[in-house]
Image (cartoon, rainbow, N blue to C red):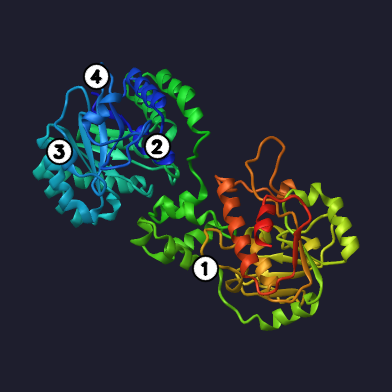
Amino acid sequence: MQHAKLLDCTLRDGAYLLDKRFGDNNIRGIIAGLIKARVDLIEVGFFQDEGFGEGKTVFKNSADAKRFIPKDKGGCMFTVLADHSRYSIDNLDECMPDSIDAVRECFFKVERAAAIEDCKRIKEKGYRCFVQPVDILGYSDIELIEFLEMVNEVEPYCLSIVDTFGSMYQEDLHRVFELIDHNLVSTCKVGFHSHNNMQMSNALSQGFVRMTYGKREAIVDGTISGMGRGAGNTPTELIAQYMVSKLGYNYDIDALLDIIDDHMDNIRTRCTWGYSTPFFVAGCYSAHVNNIAYLTQKNSIRSKDIRYILNKIGAIPRKRYDYDLLEKTYVEYLGSDIDDRAALERLRAELEGRDVLLLLPGSTATTEQERIDTYIDRHEPVVISINYVHSRIRSDFVYMSNLRRYSYWKDDPSYTAQERIVTSNIKTGTDDDKEIVISFNKLIKCGWDHVDNSGLMVLRLLDRFDVRSIAVAGFDGYSYRTGTSRNYATEDLELSNVSEDPGKLNKEIGSQLKDYLETREHHCGFKFITESRFSDVLDGAL
């Protein structure tokens, strides 16, 4: 008995990564491939009140979506998702046989009463109705049973178990399904939609198909290649292969692989998704992926720091995303303020009236070393290396504010032998007279996403003193890595999580540099002595 159906929602759940703009050719190609693969249900996008556009999987109603529905549906049912807060059912037209067959009403727990009323209207307009409550694990057992009583009044086509934050284990899925199975009207199917934060998505989907056998007709969701925000979803091709090889279903796996080759490989050049440690942490705390996207852009963040911050902000706020709260908590956590007056006086004695050379870890610190050596010979500056020790250029101080860089260098003899300026977010646990500890809080300036850029923090530190001039080397900016190109002075310094958009990151750093130059107290000489993407900032600010 084939009691389970497969629903592919690539064009909907994957759309978040592309501002919902797949492009007409990709939309039609993916739909044609899914029909050829004999997938049972195809979700083609969203019903929304706004946000429509060419090549986008956003529609006002069935008449609008009809342009992507083929005349021969191949036995597939076509669905869309209507987010309760973004779509008015007043815009929903009557169901048309040659367009959308079903509407999935998605809503947060606080919206459930109003959403159930929308579900009634969806049915009245002739559509099969899916009830899609966000974050099923956010319901207590009592709340879930009470909610099922409301659902039974609608008698929808399907009620979905939605693991919104990818935080389910097998035991959680069994518990929720048994509660639903015992309390849901018998005519209603049960669906499952998961996210892969803890690498459980495919296993949970397989388990769901097995546990529903003989009890309920089931609908399991997937996306091609697991495409979806953050860690992504159950890959359609994986759950389909399981259902073919173990349960005798007749999905065409070759057709699914053709979709990957013809469409998804190209789409992956425009966006990324998949399991990572930060998304695992998000799953542990049932946190919205936007929190992770925000925090991982911080230079000094580590996975355990993300874990702490998500825990600190609380269960309810982390299910949405409040960037101001994240920033405040992040700064409080990393930037414990200290009394650094003695440390500043020690630096004052070394720096006032001197030329200073900042040696940042950009690739030009290596490729233009001769130019740097010439400057040092002529000016005899105080050299401050930032977050690394150059193998061939001597420095008077090494500055550290990046936790990951510190962890890498802290036991290296070339680092421990140096005079070191360390910010207070780094808990060194040492009592070393070569270590000068400066308040992290006093060196950052809010108003940007990357408040902890080390180069800007050092410049703000130097503005405490009346130095004669500041020269900067290795302050290159970022670019996508291609071939042998790199962003850093050595291969060992490269990081895998350089911003997805180097242009945006460079723009923000340039904005911070411009602000520093225009607001600094000590207007000493300032220049780049190696090539920098930020040279044009000097032209406008000096």
Residue under numbered circle 2: 14
* Residue 182 drawn above or below residue 456: above
| Labels 3, 4: front one | 3
* Residue 333 drawn above or below residue 79: below
Residue under numbered circle 1: 331
Mark 3 to mark 1 CA distance (whole Å): 46 Å
Mark 1 to mark 4 CA distance (whole Å): 55 Å
Residue under numbered circle 3: 122
Q: Which residue is drawn at 36% across and 61% down?
A: 317
Give the secondary structure at mark 2.
helix
Q: Earlier in the sequence, mark 3 or mark 4?
A: 4
Disc 1 and disc 4 in contact, CB within 8 angstroms? no
Three-letter code for the amino acid on which mark 4 is drawn: Gly
- Frontmost residue, 319 versus 203: 319
Q: Where is residue 68 in the image (x, y as percent from the top left)?
A: 30, 25
Q: Where is residue 296 in the image (x, y as percent from the top left)?
A: 52, 54
